[in-house]
Every structure is written in structure tokens, then in C-alpha cells.
Image (cartoon, helix red, strand yellow):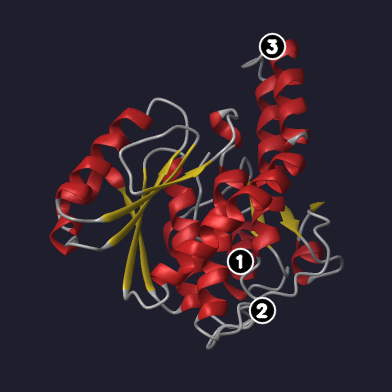
Amino acid sequence: MDTIISSEFPESCRADEKSIVLAITQSGETADTLKAVRVAKAQGAKIACLTNVVGSSITRESEIVCMTHAGPEVSVVATKTFAAQVAFLLMLSLKIARKMDKISAKEYAELRRELFALPKTVENVLKESSGVTKRLSEELKDTQHIYVIGRGIGYPIAMEGALKLKEITYIHAEAMPAGELKHGTLALIERGTPVIAVAPPGEMRRRIMGNVEEVRARGARVIMISDEKGDADVVIKMPKINEIFTPPVYIVPLQLLAYEITVRRGQDPDRPRSLAKSVTVE
């Protein structure tokens, strides 16, 4: 199983009659995703889609249609769509794992219960992290650069968080695999540089704590998102949950922080400049 950026699929991938392509698009009208689907179909692949819009172009191109049912997505930056898509993919992963006998029936039932409890978990995180994100927004509203670091499952969370920051705050926000800091980015860390460390539970946590020490030694202002205390200037406390369910939960304070900074800068968090709700041209 491979994850491919839609815009790169036509040139970099080859499908055949044994391939299944799952196209993920909020609007169902994203031009590069539609093109990738048509290329894959021409090569013989079966097409499934995950979208939020009934009757959209992607649904007419697909043999299997999966809906997120997230409701109308007013904001260009599509925060709830991210959570809904990740939740669907987590459920799909559990079902595949069970069918392949990678997990037992008991494990499947336990994981499914935890997944279905996530809405309440997210609601609690929204309430509990709003105070600290408001305080941080005042501190960060005039900064020029923010670095977001993560390892393992924490890295895609860092990428989505950095994307939200740059989309609506217009501050340069860069996501980095924490293990790659020594390959250039450490040269940009100086006294006061904001670094957000995404530190979910799991095998990678000990190693990212080492990266936190690296950037602090160079004067960085470290904000850590974790369910444990660490050597950071600010810790946004998360609930204790299974590592695989951290993306839709740990992204919440990053989304909130982006929102709060944007409002403090007097900008519209729902309609960022130069961006469109659906990318309908390549």
C-alpha cells in the first residue's frame, strides 16, 4: 500500500487490473485528484473515493463511494474534514487488520470502542487547550517563523499543523521530521525561535525528547504537545490515548493556535488570501 500525492500520480505511478485506488478529496472536484483517478482507470485500476460532497465529480468516477458526512465545510482550510477523513481511514484500517487476522476479535472491539469515543475526547481537548492557545497566540502573533517537529506518527500531525498555521496566519511555518534537524534546520534555530514539538505516546517519544533538548540548547522557545511533562517552555497537555488515535486529537491545539493567531492579527481564518475552497485547475 502506497500513499501518493495526487498531483504526482500521473508521472510517478503505474496501476493495473490488480490495483485499487482510494481517492481522497473534500470537495470531490479537486483537479489533480480527478486527473489521477482517470489515469488509474485507463490503466485498469478499480477506483474508490472518500469525499464529503454527494454527487460530486469524484463520485461519478468511482465504483465505490465513501462519504465522510462531515456537513458543509465553510472554511477554506477544512479542519473538520481532516478529522473526519482520518477517522474513516482509522476505521478502515481496523477492519482490514481484522479481516487479515492481524488483530484478534477482542483487540478489534477494544480499538473500535476507543475510536468511537474520540468525539468526546476531542471535545475535552478543545475546552482544555483553548486557554493556553489564546495565551500563546499573543506571544506568537508577530513572529516570522515557526518550526513544527515530529517523529513517526507525530510527523504527519506536524505537517498538518504547519499547513494550518501558514494557510491562515501567513506566518512561515515549516514541519520537519525531528530526526532530520541536523541536516540543515538546526542552523535556523536561534534564541527565541518558536519550535512546536508533537510528542505522542509510543516508541518515538524518547527520541523526540532528545530533539527538544537539541533545539532548547540553541535557545528555541519550545511548545510541546504531549500527554506527559517534558523539558519544554510550555506543555499543551493531551489525554492518554492509544498512539494510533493521536492524529485527530493532537491536531486540535495546532488548529486552535492557528485560529487564535489569525484573529489576533486581524485576518479572516475562514477565507485566507490566494486560496480557493476547491482547487479546480492544475
Give the mark nearer the N terminus: 2 vs 1: 1
Task: Indicate the position of residue 178 as horizontal and vertical percent values.
Answer: 29, 45
**Which mark is on residue 277?**
2
- Residue linked to disc 3: 104
Q: Residues within 10 Å of mark 3 (few under 14, many from 20)?
A: few
Along the viewing direction, whichever of 3 and 61 lies nearer the viewer: 3
Side of 147 where 218 appears, left or right: left
Local secondary structure at mark 1: helix
Residue lying at 65% horizontally and 15% vertically, measured from the top left: 103
Give the mark nearer the N terminus: 3 vs 2: 3
**Tag 3 near tag 1, CB within 8 Å:** no
Furthest toward the right, the residue is 55
Amino acid on which the number 1 mark rests in the picture: Thr
The answer to whether residue 70 is visible is yes
Question: Where is 29 relative to 211, above or below?
Answer: below
**Closer to the eye: label 3 or 1:** 3
- Residue linked to disc 1: 33
Task: Indicate the position of residue 78 as horizontal and vertical percent values.
Answer: 66, 67
Give the mark nearer the N terminus: 3 vs 1: 1
Along the viewing direction, whichever of 73 and 193 lies nearer the viewer: 193
Along the viewing direction, whichever of 22 and 185 lies nearer the viewer: 185
Residue lying at 58% horizontally and 47% vertically, measured from the top left: 16
Q: Residues within 10 Å of mark 1 (few under 14, many from 20)?
A: many
**Tag 2 near tag 1, CB within 8 Å:** no
Side of 201 where 122 appears, left or right: right
Question: Where is 205 relative to 103, above or below?
Answer: below
Side of 200 where 97 appears, left or right: right
Local secondary structure at mark 2: loop
Instruction: Calculate the distance from the C-alpha at mark 3 to the C-alpha at mark 1.
Output: 35 Å
Q: Residues within 10 Å of mark 2 (few under 14, many from 20)?
A: some
